[in-house]
Image (spheres, rainbow, N blue to C red):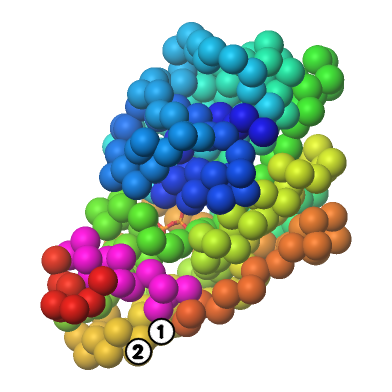
């Protein structure tokens, strides 16, 4: 297949490039590098089945030749990023989704939208299953991302229903691994970087809010299976292993041997109190569930951050 991945220079996008190339497909990346990084795909430069187009996907799109599938992963995705780029976030979720859907229709391509657990907002149903409609504050600081993705889902379903476009929607929960930006403000890079520097971990609020963390390789497997499946309605993809942020901080300190403990900082506005995917649907329709434990995933992620921080000791990769 010839596959277009928007946001392909980002954290998830770049891992998807690796996976699709490894399966023998041809990959075209479109990314304006607003929050993505050329370094994430630098190792693919010169690959005969890989092409990079620096392009803002909210503008008119032109791609030469056939396209079999479009994966729309372009968007600022960490709270710090989308609060810094609120208008770009709204535009890429709304206009970018419209433009890429139009391209998929023109090329007769299958379309997969990277949606998010944020469509559930600060959820009143726990764990979250796909039939829950969510509890989102449209005008709060997170609204720019949440509403853009909710609009994007509506747009995808409209193209499916009106034009018969072959579409998929992945609702992606917290995912982590190598190539996350060290300063993207999310809890995983923040905690790992702080722990490796021997600093206390910054826990927001009292740390009782919960999250459920999925290792990137598991997520990529879920996306791959969803694309190849026939499931048109949204599917949650994430790891159901839930813990409080305070427990997560203690886990990071234990794995890294950091003795500096934690310090408490104010809780950001509208920070969801709980989050855990119900993945029964993914188990049923994709035969998918995460395989990598938190400990193992963190162990696999640490070397990347050590390197980014310049903490690599000689002889280590
Ligand atoms: N968080 C924290 N310390 C940090 C960064 C984040 O306690 O240094 C908390 C944040 O308030 C939230 C959780 O960790 O409750 C996950 O935050 P993240 O930004 O990773 O993504 P979210 O799941 O909120 O989209």
- Residue designated by label 1: 251
Q: Residue 42 location in percent, x, y?
A: 32, 43
Placement of 201 over or under 141, stated as above or below: below
- Residue designated by label 2: 254
Q: Do the residues bearing badges 2 and 1 touch, measured as CB atoms within 8 Å?
A: yes
Q: Residue 270 location in percent, x, y?
A: 46, 51
Dot 1 crowding, Cα within 10 Å, few <14, some 14–19, many 20+: some
Residue visible at 55% across and 62% down in the picture:
217
How many numbered markers are drawn? Answer: 2
Residue 282 image-quadrant placement: bottom right
Q: Nearer the viewer, residue 134 or 234?
A: 234
Image region (quadrant) for ligand 1: bottom left
In-image side of 288 versus 53 (left or right): right
Q: Nearer the viewer, residue 109 or 76?
A: 109
Placement of 275 over or under 89, stated as above or below: below
In-image side of 262 versus 199 (left or right): right
Q: Which mark is residue 69?
A: none
Q: Which residues are magenta?
A: 297-309
Q: Quadrant of the C terminus?
A: bottom left
Residue visible at 18% across and 78% down in the picture:
315
């Amino acid at each position: 297949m010839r596959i277009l991945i928007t946001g392909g220079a980002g954290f998830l996008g770049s891992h998807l490039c690796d996976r699709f190339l490894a399966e023998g497909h041809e990959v075209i990346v479109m990314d304006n590098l607003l929050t993505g990084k050329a370094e994430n795909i630098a190792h693919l430069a010169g690959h005969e089945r890989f092409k990079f187009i620096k392009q803002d996907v909210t503008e008119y799109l032109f791609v030469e030749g056939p396209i079999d599938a479009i994966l729309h992963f372009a968007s600022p995705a960490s709270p710090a990023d989308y609060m810094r780029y609120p208008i770009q976030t709204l535009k890429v979720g709304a206009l970018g989704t419209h433009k890429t859907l139009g391209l998929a229709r023109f090329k007769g391509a299958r379309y997969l939208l990277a949606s998010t657990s944020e469509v559930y907002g600060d959820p009143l149903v726990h764990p979250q299953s796909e039939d829950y409609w969510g509890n989102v504050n449209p005008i709060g600081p997170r609204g720019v991302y949440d509403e853009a993705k909710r609009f994007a889902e509506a747009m995808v379903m409209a193209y499916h229903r009106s034009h018969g476009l072959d579409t998929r929607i992945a609702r992606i929960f917290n995912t982590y691994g190598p190539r996350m930006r060290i300063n993207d403000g999310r809890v995983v890079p923040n905690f790992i970087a702080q722990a490796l520097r021997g600093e206390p971990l910054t826990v927001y609020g009292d740390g009782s809010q919960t999250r459920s963390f999925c290792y990137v390789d598991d997520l990529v497997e879920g996306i791959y299976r969803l694309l190849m499946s026939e499931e048109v309605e949204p599917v949650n993809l994430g790891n159901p292993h839930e813990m409080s942020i305070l427990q997560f901080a203690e886990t990071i300190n234990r794995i890294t041997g950091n003795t500096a403990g934690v310090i408490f900082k104010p809780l950001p506005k509208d920070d969801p109190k709980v989050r855990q995917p119900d993945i029964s649907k993914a188990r049923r329709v994709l035969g998918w569930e995460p395989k990598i434990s938190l400990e193992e995933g963190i162990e696999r992620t640490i070397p990347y951050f050590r390197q980014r921080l310049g903490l690599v000791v000689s002889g280590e990769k």
